[in-house]
Amino acid sequence: MISWVGGHPRPLRRTDERPRTRTAPLARRRDRLALAVPLLALAPPAQAASSKACAGGGYRLVDAATQRVLARDTDREAVTTVRAADLGDRVLVQGRYNQYVVRTGDFALFDYAFTGAPNRLDMTGRRFTPVFASKVPDHRGLTLGGDLTVTLEEEDLVVSRAGTGLSMRIQSKDCAQGGIFQMEPERGDGTRTRIVHTLATGAGAVTPFYFDNPHFRARAGQFLGSACTSVETGPPSRCCVQVSPRVTIGNDASPRFVARDSAQVAERVDQPDCGAQVAPDVDHCGRVSVWDVASGGRMGFVTGEYAVEVANPPTECVSDCQAQNQVRGRLAVLGHPFPVPAGSRLSPAESTLLLPPLTAP
């Protein structure tokens, strides 16, 4: 069940918990997820300990209007089809570690939050921690009207739905941190989809904000990683990466909490009236980010160490993409300051300028 308090979802303690047995072969899990951002379950054996972030994780999908359970996690892969005629306007996705709401007609996301459930890799200090108020795609008149397909196995979730000239997929992991969410639009006309991310507000010290990470700003231009022989010249490679300025997400309550938007075949739309107090090259507001995502591209969300490692951008891939995280432990991790200095926090919260036209394919 989902408890709603003050207009926002709150986690309830699960009473159906059970021991988990890992039964899916790793190769099959790689093929099924094929994520653009590094996911904990896909890490090489040397990084297997990071799976602790997902211990006991698993989702239930609940119709927001009727509270009917549409699907729930199992120890083995289970595929559920919810007929369009039986589908309400919104579905609650409730996990042990994170939760959110999906609007079924366009796959807009609302009220993404970490529940604060205990985990040795918890970033929240066991606090309920809202992150996104919304992630809203603009389909320019197209809608999703087909059946809803839900694939669940342990902490992994894939939800997809199609309409005329449009399909959307959400992939998610119920983990305390890592690469845990991505949204994937695909259009019949091959054009991009604009997605607007808006951070949560009104949550006191756990209210999130975008900031220009000073640990990255201070080392911009340097080459870092296990394969580097020089911070000035690199040479650049998969494990020797030049540092670029980075915008990350933090709050004032949790020293370990850090996150960032993570894109594959997507362009962030500059907002020129934001961020100038930090540096002229930022063009990013304090609460909103805007992205033009290619058809078949991915708009992800990474947290914890994944948000602050110095890695090469994802490859330009829109079909049969494979996760690229075989360099875990060989990349520099720069972290973030806590508390975040006032001079690094981006402002204003939102732009007052009209957005430019959609980026061409």
Image (cartoon, helix red, strand yellow):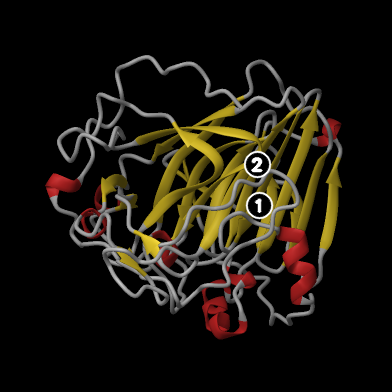
Using residue 252 as the reference point, say whether residue 134 is left or right of it: right
Query: Where is residue 213 shown, x and y percent of the image?
Result: 26, 53
Q: Going from the N terminus, do you reach mark 2 or mark 1 first?
A: 1
Using residue 356 as the reference point, say whether residue 246 is left or right of it: left
Query: 60 or 188: which is nearer to us?
Result: 188
Are the residues tagged 2 and 1 within 8 Å (C-beta)? yes
Residue at 65 percent across and 66 percent down: it is 155
Quickly name the residue at label 1: 171
Q: Quadrant of the C terminus?
A: top right
Residue at 70 percent across and 69 percent down: it is 154
**Residue 204 appears anywhere in the view:** yes
Secondary structure, mark 1, is strand
Query: Where is residue 137 shown, x and y percent of the image?
Result: 57, 30
Quickly name the residue at label 2: 184
Q: Is residue 57 above or below residue 264?
A: below
Secondary structure, mark 2, is strand
